[in-house]
Image (tube, grey):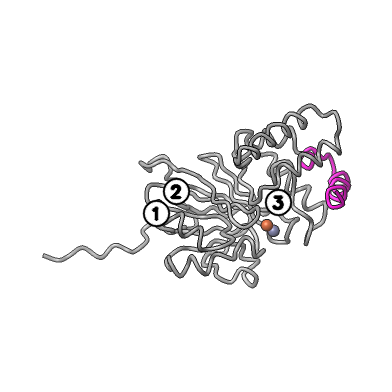
Amino acid sequence: MAHPPAEPAHPHPPVHDPEPTSQHSPQPLALWLIPVLRDNYVMVLQRGRRAAVVDPAVAEPVAAALEERGVELEAILHTHHHSDHIGGTPGLLRRWPQAAVVAAAEDRQRIPCQTLGVGDGDRIVVLDELVEVLAVPGHTSAHLAYWLPASGHLFCGDTLFVGGCGRLFEGTPEQMHASLQRLAALPEATRVWCAHEYTEANFRWALAEAPGDRAIAARLQEVCGLRAAGQATVPSSIGQERRTNLFLRAGSAAELARLRRSKDQW
Ligand code: ZN
Ligand code: FE
């Protein structure tokens, strides 16, 4: 009797033109964070024993956390090329050489390990979950965000922070304003997973910038409580950010530029 053909090692690699399959997948998608370095977060998506990570700054603590949970890494997603977002990828690939590496095709030079170059409007499947790619330039010229419409998650790297936004290293205020407005237009309940724990400083600055703003004052109190208890303030939600993030509330690129200068000097 002939044996059936061998199963490929990774039966669910990210692919273009996917059929959304999350509703057929028996195991729920779980998300969790690994705090690394001084204030970075590496986001982990897990479905059963399969995992994907977003922006692995370093390899060792990420590999250890995945191994502790007994999961296999299938994909690494990058939002942008800064070393505190891609530094762990070579080490993770040594441990899981089959893992797909998703990043901006435009940044192929600066994100060398990528196996799947993507750009604005691309749709891929990661762990049976549909992921939409959004170009959000401003912090860097080729910065991407990854949106999971079925489960309502957003990985926004250093573009949108809880109560803040990324510095304008390569983009204009116009670009950052457009990028943030695009994220602000996602559904209210979308969970916002950014790559740094900058929240408390962001809201201290925001309250100094907008004294008397009750929503911001309440938010500052809330995040101080979380931080004092050693808890992450990530994820936030798009609704929360629309109400309390001055950069999302900025009505124009000029207003955003003014706020960004103020925060840079704070
Ligand atoms: Zn960055
Ligand atoms: Fe960063």
Question: Eyeballing the image, is 156 above or below 143?
Answer: above
Instruction: State the extent of the magenta-drawn residues as a range.
Output: 246-266
Q: Position of residue 106 (x, y in %)?
A: 65, 66
On the image, numbered disc 1 is attached to which residue? 71
Disc 2 + disc 1, Cβ < 8 Å: yes
| Residue 209, placed above or below residue 70 | above
Q: Are marks 1 and 3 in contact (CB under 8 Å)?
A: no
Residue at (74, 57) in percent of width and height:
139
Between the C-alphas of marks 1 and 3, the distance is: 29 Å
Q: Determine which residue is flagged by label 2.
A: 46
Judge from the rendering whether residue 219 lies leftward or rightward of residue 29; answer left or right: right
Dot 1 amino acid type: Val
Q: Position of residue 189 (x, y in %)?
A: 60, 33
Name the residue rendered at 26%, 65% in the picture: 6
- Badge 3: how crowded within 10 Å, few (<14), some, or many (20+)? many
Quadrant (top left/top right/bottom left/bottom right) for the N terminus: bottom left
Relative to 94, residue 223 above or below? above
Task: Look at the numbered disc 1 and give the secondary structure of its residue.
Answer: loop
Asked whether 263 falls inside the magenta stretch, the response is yes
Disc number for residue 233: none
Q: Where, by quadrant of the figure, is residue 224 drawn?
A: top right
Place of residue 223 in the rendered image (x, y in percent of width and height, measured from the top left) = 68, 36
Which structural element holds mark 2? strand
Relative to 34, residue 204 above or below = above
